[in-house]
Amino acid sequence: MPGARAAAIGSLTIAAMRVLVVGAGFAGCCAALLLRESLGADVIVLERAHVPGGMLRTLHTADGVPYEYGPRVVSVFRGTPDVLPFLRRYLDLQERRIYQGTRLRPGYPVIPFPVDIESLRALPCGAQVERELAAIRERGAPPGERDLRDYLETSVGPTLTELAFEGFNRKFWGRRLEDMPAEWGKLRRLERIARTGRYRLPSEAAHYYPAGGFNGLFDRMLAGVDVRYGVTVRRIESDGRRASVATDAGAFAADLVVSTAPIDAQLDHRHGALEWRGYRVEVDVVGRDAEPPLGTAPDGVPFAWLYTPWADTPVCRTTDFGVIHHGPRAADRPGPTVLLREIVDDSVAMYPVWWEDAKFLRYLDDAVRLANVIPLGRLGLYKYTTMDSTYAMVRRLADSLGEYLSAAPARRVELLRGVRGDWGN
Ligand SMILES: Cc1cc2nc3c(=O)[nH]c(=O)nc-3n(C[C@H](O)[C@H](O)[C@H](O)COP(=O)(O)OP(=O)(O)OC[C@H]3O[C@@H](n4cnc5c(N)ncnc54)[C@H](O)[C@@H]3O)c2cc1C
């Protein structure tokens, strides 16, 4: 991985270090590669599960029909296209033109997503939405800042606020718009909708499907790495020189630990558990000859994803893997495919919540005091990540590792906040 600089703890250089990486998800595997390939460290990966990949796994139904549990495709929507050449070392990435649709209310037709003014116009309330957007543009005032409802109603209008954001917010975040800060809308620059008539931004990224699924990625990234599967890390301690990792399979000692496991659990939940939101998944096998089950875009191409933003269905998104695996032409499907529904279920830890950030920062303050223990990834740094933002995180760590290892705790916090990036990336 380019960009890495020689790093040292005291007089020990990374090349002479024993490094433990906790977790064989995408973050842990990228870190293990960096530490071995670029810095020459002696790396052991400890993974709780019996397979690598974490959230990123291609699964199969009892009849062997494949579907993805986490990322369905590689997308470059967070501004780090350098993940593509990196992944191409391990995967045959095939570009997919993927259409996403949304039914904004029960009984409404499915329209393309990101939504645009043309498709909104076709809805029963289309004229109303258009009038509200035109009035906002004419007024030209910045969005209100009282709370997220105020922000949205003054930047996209009350009708679109209700259709696209109200129910989704309640369902997904468990909060009313008036209980969320305007800051959330600002971060996502939702006010652009009034100018463009489009929302769900940025979303026109190219998507790539890895031929044969994602699992081979981890086998190839981990080739030659000492990975211990079925080992759960319970606690990490450090005396400043050596770190010790307590696991259910005994203790491991190391010069450096990079942990992609949950930061709160690794520090004994001393500030309380960090909150997560998530989905459970339900799968149905769909026959080869079924009509496109999610409907088709105006040009006849079937939708791969369907978003359902109203509150009184627990389903957030449905995926048709036929389109993702084989492309948009039904005739290309070699056999049955999977239709997967994501059902709101907060016992599944997928998405961190912004209102826990202060608590996370207390954990980060404690973590940096363990000089040679570095939290990383979506669980270690408590941030929603995608593959490209995970890769960017690991690259940023590589760039600051030398300084990190010899810095004072206050500077380490700054560096790790930089590695984490903000909520917008
Ligand atoms: C439904 C869904 C859809 C997604 N869609 C996309 C998408 O389209 N595009 C995209 O780019 N990204 C997408 N993502 C995000 C992507 O999955 C993540 O960015 C990425 O997989 C995070 O990797 P990670 O290594 O940080 O975390 P994880 O994948 O969670 O890996 C953490 C690993 O650590 C292990 N572990 C945890 N605790 C311990 C412990 N105590 N001891 C030992 N091991 C431990 C876990 O078993 C796991 O293997 C999606 C995620 C989900 C859930």
Image: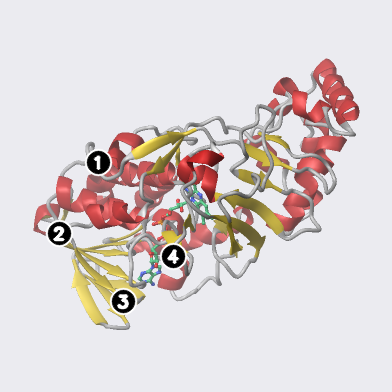
Disc 3 marks a residue whose amino acid type is: Val
| Residue drawn at point x = 34 percent, y = 64 percent | 23
Report how far apart the C-alphas of labels 3 and 2 lie in the structure: 19 Å
Report how far apart the C-alphas of labels 4 and 2 lie in the structure: 28 Å
- Where residue 133 sits, quadrant-wise, is top right
Pointer 4 residue: 263
Report how far apart the C-alphas of labels 1 and 2 lie in the structure: 16 Å
Q: Which secondary structure, mark 3?
A: loop
- Eyeballing the image, is 423 above or below 409? above
Disc 4 marks a residue whose amino acid type is: Ile
Mark 3 and mark 4 lie on one chain; the one further toward the N terminus is 3
Ligand 1 closer than 8 Å to label 3 CB: yes
Pointer 1 residue: 89
Neighbor class of circle 1 (other Cα within 10 Å; few <14, some 14-19, many 20+) is few
Neighbor class of circle 4 (other Cα within 10 Å; few <14, some 14-19, many 20+) is many
Q: Any mark on residue 224, and which? A: 2
Mark 3 and mark 2 lie on one chain; the one further toward the N terminus is 2
Disc 1 marks a residue whose amino acid type is: Arg
**Which sits in the foreground, 75 or 237?**
75
Mark 1 and mark 4 lie on one chain; the one further toward the N terminus is 1
Pointer 3 residue: 231
Q: Which secondary structure, mark 4?
A: helix
Q: Nearer the viewer, mark 3 or mark 4?
A: 3
Q: Quadrant of the N terminus?
A: top left
Spot occupied by residue 371 in the image (x, y as percentages of width and height): 28, 61
